[in-house]
Image: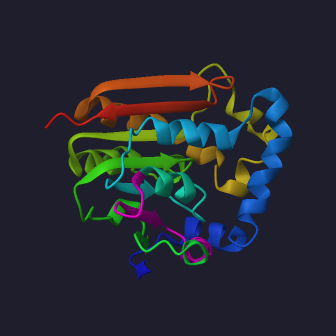
């Protein structure tokens, strides 16, 4: 596992939660009756990449590797999976998953994504619930777009605060702050920068808001 520059506050937040992160995520299954289905949403984001055996895919903010089984199934042993996360502790959990499954084509790098130099031309780039925590998310997406092969796709699943909701309502959603989503994060509206970067760099960009407009999918295709 490679290491690089880290942003302390976010890295420390996820270092504290790394060993229990997967268990905490499973708690959200209790909300499935309300249509809150993170595993299904992740699978949909992965399908939007249209990956095939032998492809290279980069997972921005891969965390403990929750997407890796599905990504591996898509690209196979001849493909390449590159996982990036700011938290080395989260990636230690991901490495355990990789080792347990004997996956030899997964590379992990601990890095602040705002300082990440995308090393390869990729067929697909995925990000799930990570870019909302990145202050310069628009530039990160622009950099990611430039690393795509012609016909390559980016698929992003993340959170956006509904336009007509007061930020003070954030306290109702108790799970935001423990995952690093603060009042200041919501005021900065990083999702808008993500959408703009996608529109500026890709073709066939499709944005879908759902779950009370708190969540979104966006995907697009590289034409260059």
Name the residue at 64% across, 19% down: 164
Percent position of residue 163, x then y: 59, 22
- Does residue 110 appear in this view? no
Q: How many marks?
A: 0
Locate residue 215, reporting x and y percent.
Answer: 60, 32
| Above or below, comparing residue 196 to residue 67 in the picture | above
Q: Measuring from the top left, give residue 35's x and y in whole percent.
A: 75, 28
Dividing the picture into quarters, in which one does residue 40 lie?
top right
Q: Which residues are magenta?
A: 75-97
Residue 202 falls in image quadrant: top left
| Residue 63 in picture, x, y percent from top left | 57, 63
In the rendered image, the vertical position of residue 51 relative to residue 13, given as above or below:
above
Q: Nearer the viewer, residue 109 or 122?
A: 122
Q: Report the residue at 40% width, 38% height from top.
A: 194
Residue at x-position 18% and y-position 33%: 223
Whether residue 201 appears in this view of the structure is yes
When the figure is inspected, residue 183 is found, relative to residue 166, above or below; the finding is below
Here the colouring is rainbow
Left or right, 81 with respect to 31, comes to left
């Amino acid at each position: 596992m490679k290491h690089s520059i880290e942003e302390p506050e976010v890295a420390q937040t996820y270092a504290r939660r790394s060993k229990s992160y997967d268990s905490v995520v499973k708690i959200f299954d209790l909300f499935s009756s309300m249509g809150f289905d993170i595993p299904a949403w992740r699978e949909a984001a992965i399908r939007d990449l249209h990956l095939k055996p032998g492809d290279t895919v980069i997972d921005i903010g891969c965390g403990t590797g929750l997407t890796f089984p599905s990504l591996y199934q898509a690209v196979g042993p001849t493909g390449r999976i590159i996982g990036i996360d700011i938290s080395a502790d989260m990636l230690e959990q991901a490495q355990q998953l990789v080792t347990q499954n004997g996956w030899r084509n997964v590379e992990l790098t601990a890095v602040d994504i705002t300082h990440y130099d995308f090393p390869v031309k990729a067929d697909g780039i995925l990000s799930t619930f990570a870019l909302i925590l990145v202050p310069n998310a628009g530039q990160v997406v622009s950099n990611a777009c430039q690393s795509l092969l012609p016909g390559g796709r980016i698929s992003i699943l993340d959170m956006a605060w509904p336009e007509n909701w007061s930020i003070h309502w954030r306290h109702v959603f108790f799970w935001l702050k423990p995952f690093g989503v603060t009042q200041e994060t919501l005021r900065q509206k990083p999702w808008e920068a993500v959408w703009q970067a996608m529109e500026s760099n890709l073709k066939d960009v499709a944005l879908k808001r759902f779950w009370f407009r708190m969540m979104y999918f966006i995907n697009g295709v590289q034409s260059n």
